[in-house]
Amino acid sequence: MQRQLESPYSRLINVSTGETAPEKRETVINDKIVILEDSYRKVKKLPDWKESRKMQDAAVALYEYVLPVYKKEYKELASLYDKDASPAEISRMEKEIYDHHAANFETLYAALIDAGKVYAEKYNINVRWDVRTRP
């Protein structure tokens, strides 16, 4: 998330000239929240199937952990970027988020991956678990 806030995507300002501008960081976070909430609702609506219950529960727990962090801490961080806060202030907030949430996130993420591995193995689903999807 920090890389996306450091270098947000651009939006088109002028169609005829092709001029773009970086998107506000608040918009980046709000877009991410919309995606997370949509995915969370989809997982919650999945049929209650005994075989995937552990995986679904792990996914729900992860969504329920990260959504409040995005809605509070990451919005605050985005606000610092949008207000052109000092790099020291931004770095302090990034460190606070990491120090407060990284360990819990990693635990919940690992539980989801572990449940996914069991499910994939049981149903012979070929998954490349060694592919790095995040820094």
Image (cartoon, helix red, strand yellow):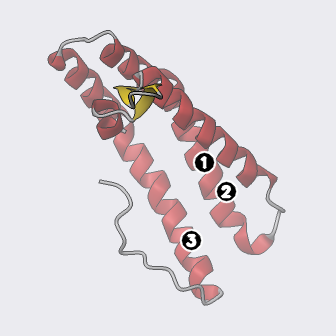
Tell whether label 2 touches label 3 (CB within 8 Å).
no
Left or right: 109 with respect to 103? right
Left or right: 84 with respect to 115? left
Residue in view at x 34 percent, y 65 percent: 132
Q: Where's residue 81, x and y in %?
A: 31, 18
- Give the number of the disc on residue 57: 2
Q: Where's residue 61, x and y in %?
A: 60, 48
Q: Where's residue 19, x and y in %?
A: 36, 27
Residue in view at x 49 percent, y 52 percent: 108
In space, the residues marked 2 and 1 are separated at their CA atoms by 6 Å
Badge 1 crowding class, 10 Å Cα cut-off, few under 14, some 14 to 19, many 20 or more, is: some
Answer whether residue 73 is visible to the viewer in this image. no
Q: Which residue is mark 3?
A: 116
Q: Amino acid at mark 1?
A: Ala
Q: Say whether disc 3 or disc 2 marks the residue closer to the N-terminus.
A: 2
In space, the residues marked 3 and 1 are separated at their CA atoms by 14 Å
In space, the residues marked 3 and 2 are separated at their CA atoms by 11 Å
Residue farthest right in this picture: 47
Q: Quadrant of the N terminus?
A: top left
Q: Secondary structure at mark 2?
A: helix
Q: Which residue is mark 1?
A: 61
Q: Secondary structure at mark 3?
A: helix
Q: Amino acid at mark 2?
A: Asp
Considering only vertical position in the picture, is 46 above or below 115? above
Q: Amino acid at mark 3?
A: Gly
| 8, 120: nearer the viewer | 8
Residue farthest front in this picture: 16
Answer whether residue 25 is visible to the viewer in this image. yes
